[in-house]
Image (cartoon, rainbow, N blue to C red):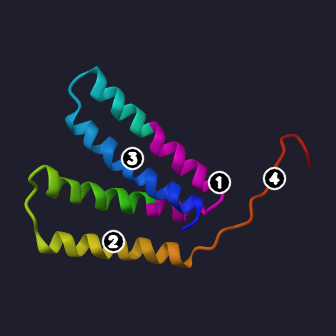
């Protein structure tokens, strides 16, 4: 896995953390941790989007974040386990993996402001 895809994966992990934080934050420190997770998540997603196709980066980021949040709800917060829900998450992740497999990196372009 190359560096940009690793950034997308880490960004999705931080997305799960901040989504959980939005629900469970209760004081200054937990809200601060949530804000930091939001910042890290979006920073990494934006950095990856500078090299990879933005639409694919966003789809993978949201898909992994959604699956991670649903699984965290089941594992850590007592959300009822449902086979249909797990099947649909697997379908979502299959689409995310498919997008990654068919997406090719574009060469980085050096664009300098003001030059034509």
Q: Can see residue 54?
A: no
> Along the horizontal axis of the image, is 66 left or right of 115?
left
Q: Toward which corner of the image does residue 66 lie, by quadrant?
A: bottom left
> Along the horizontal axis of the image, is 67 left or right of 56?
left
Residue 50 - label: 1
Which residue appears at 35% of the width and 71% of the height?
Answer: 93
Q: Earlier in the sequence, mark 2 or mark 3?
A: 3
Give the residue at mark 4: 110
Q: Can see residue 46?
A: yes
Residue 8: % across, % down: 49, 57
Residue 33 position (above or below residue 45): above
- Give the mark toward the camera: 3 or 4: 3
Residue 40: % across, % down: 47, 41
Residue 14 - label: 3
Residue in front for this viewpoint, 106 or 7? 7
Q: Are marks 2 and 4 in contact (CB under 8 Å)?
A: no
Q: What is the CA distance from the residue labelled 1 to the residue labelled 2?
A: 24 Å
Q: What is the CA distance from the residue labelled 2 to the residue labelled 4?
A: 35 Å
Give the residue at mark 2: 92
Give the residues drawn in magenta, as a range: 39-60
Disc 2 is placed on an element classified as: helix
Q: Earlier in the sequence, mark 3 or mark 4?
A: 3
């Amino acid at each position: 896995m190359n560096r940009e895809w690793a950034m997308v994966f880490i960004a999705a992990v931080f997305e799960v953390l901040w989504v959980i934080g939005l629900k469970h934050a209760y004081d200054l420190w937990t809200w601060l941790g949530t804000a930091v997770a939001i910042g890290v998540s979006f920073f990494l997603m934006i950095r990856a989007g500078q090299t990879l196709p933005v639409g694919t980066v966003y789809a993978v980021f949201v898909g992994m974040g959604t699956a991670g949040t649903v699984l965290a709800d089941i594992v850590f917060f007592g959300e009822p386990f449902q086979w249909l829900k797990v099947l649909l998450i697997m379908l979502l992740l299959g689409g995310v993996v498919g997008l990654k497999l068919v997406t090719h990196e574009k060469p980085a372009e050096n664009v300098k402001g003001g030059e034509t």
